[in-house]
Structure formats: structure tokens, C-alpha cells
Amino acid sequence: MKDKLYRFIEDLATIEPLPNVHNQYDYSNEENAIRRENLLIYLKQMQNLRPRIMLVAEAPGYRGSRLTGVPFTSEHLLMNNMNGTHIFGKEAGYRLATENDKLLKEATATIIMETLVNHNILALAWNAFPFHPHKPGIDNSNRAPLKNELIIGEQFLLKLINLFEIEQVVAIGRKAEQSLKKLNIPSHIVRHPAQGGKNEFVQGIIKLKETY
């Protein structure tokens, strides 16, 4: 399994550059080595914990896993264990790719992780498109992944589902649902927590727990 995880991350790192997309795992700068290592630590932890649920969102944000390398995290979440979970933190080996005076937070990542912790749900986190799509010329921005970008993400989505023997997949938002439908993977869909969707997202996760 360890060798498969290494190969998985290497495959991410060697994807050909795409316009208006930042690959936070590639070899374009030394900082990405830390992001690759952070992702490996996370996947190894999940390997030990054996989650049977996978949450699939849209794509990394510029304040979130674009910086950390780990889906559904911000710098603050990565370096500080949230009450109720012991996955993250310096003690687990995670590091910051860049040193900042203040650890950045991301609202979506915080909402998702708090909801999982509050309802005692163990889930593997991933994105339909694993790289950071941004607006032309504006690195610190987010945009929805394009159709051809989602196609690139399909191979990685399938690999993780098979590697971890996932039994239930949850799509966070329509883009993730589209990718899963295209791959003929049954999924439970919940509202994306961004843009006022927090309450619907939380209720969707509660319903998931009740039915799964």
C-alpha cells in the first residue's frame, strides 16, 4: 500500500501544466516537496484508520489545500488539532510549506472538518479536481474547474476509491456529483457549504449518518 501511495502522489506531481491551474504537488518549487509529504502523511493516516466513507468536493482553494497539500485543510487546521480529532498538528509530522506570521484559515475547510468532528464521522477527503484552478492572472483566486480539468481528476478519484476500498461516496456540490456520475459511481450529494450553504451542508451530513 505504501508504494501505491508514493506512486499516487508522483502521478499528481507529474501532470502536465495546465493554463490557470496551480499544481501544488509538482516540482516547480521546493515548497511543493513539503506539500507532497503532507499529503503522504495524511494518506498513511487514513490507511491506518480505514475510513469507508469518502467526501469529494470540487477543487482546492487558494487559502486551503493549495497551501497545505491536504484536502479540506487550511494552514490553521493542519498545524492545530481541532477538538475531537487527533489527525493533524506538528506532532503528526505536518509542516508549513511557507512560514507566515499568521496561519491562514479557510471557511469551507473549517465548516467541513467541524461537521465531521461534531458528528463523529471518519471520512477520506478528496477533490474532483485535485489542483487549484484560479482566474486568469490572479493566483489568489478561486474558480470552478472546467470540464477538461474534471476529466483529468477522474483517474485520481478512481484510484483512491479503489485503494481505500471506499463503500460510500459523498459529493459536496454539483461539480463533484457530475464527476461521480460520469464514472458511474453511486453517491450521496450534500450542499456545498460555501455561499451560505453551511446549514444545508450540516443537515445533509446528519442525514447521511442516519442512513448509512
Image (spheres, rainbow, N blue to C red):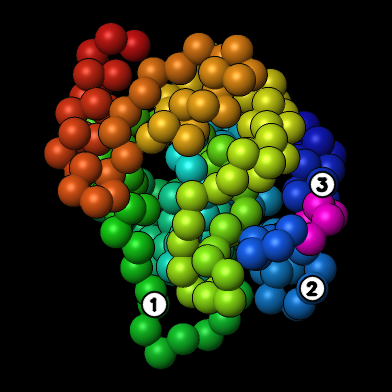
Q: CA distance from mark 1 to mark 3?
A: 29 Å
Q: Which residue is mark 1?
A: 103
Drawn side of residue 43 relative to residue 108, left or right:
right
Corner quadrant of residue 147: top right
For the stretch drawn in magenta, the main secondary structure is loop
Determine the CA span between mark 3 and mark 2. Answer: 15 Å
Assess whether residue 188 is covered by the magenta stretch. Answer: no
Q: Quadrant of the N terminus?
A: top right
Three-letter residue code for mark 2: Ser
Question: Residue 23's spot in the image, x, y percent?
Answer: 69, 61
The span picked out in magenta is 13-17
Q: Secondary structure at mark 2?
A: loop
User: In the rendering, at what x and y percent does residue 200 appear?
Assistant: 18, 34
Camera-side residue: 176 or 137? 137
Q: Earlier in the sequence, mark 1 or mark 2?
A: 2
Residue designated by label 3: 11
Residue at 46% x, 86% y is 100
Which element is circle 1 on? loop
Outermost residue, bottom direction?
A: 101
Residue type at mark 3 is Asp
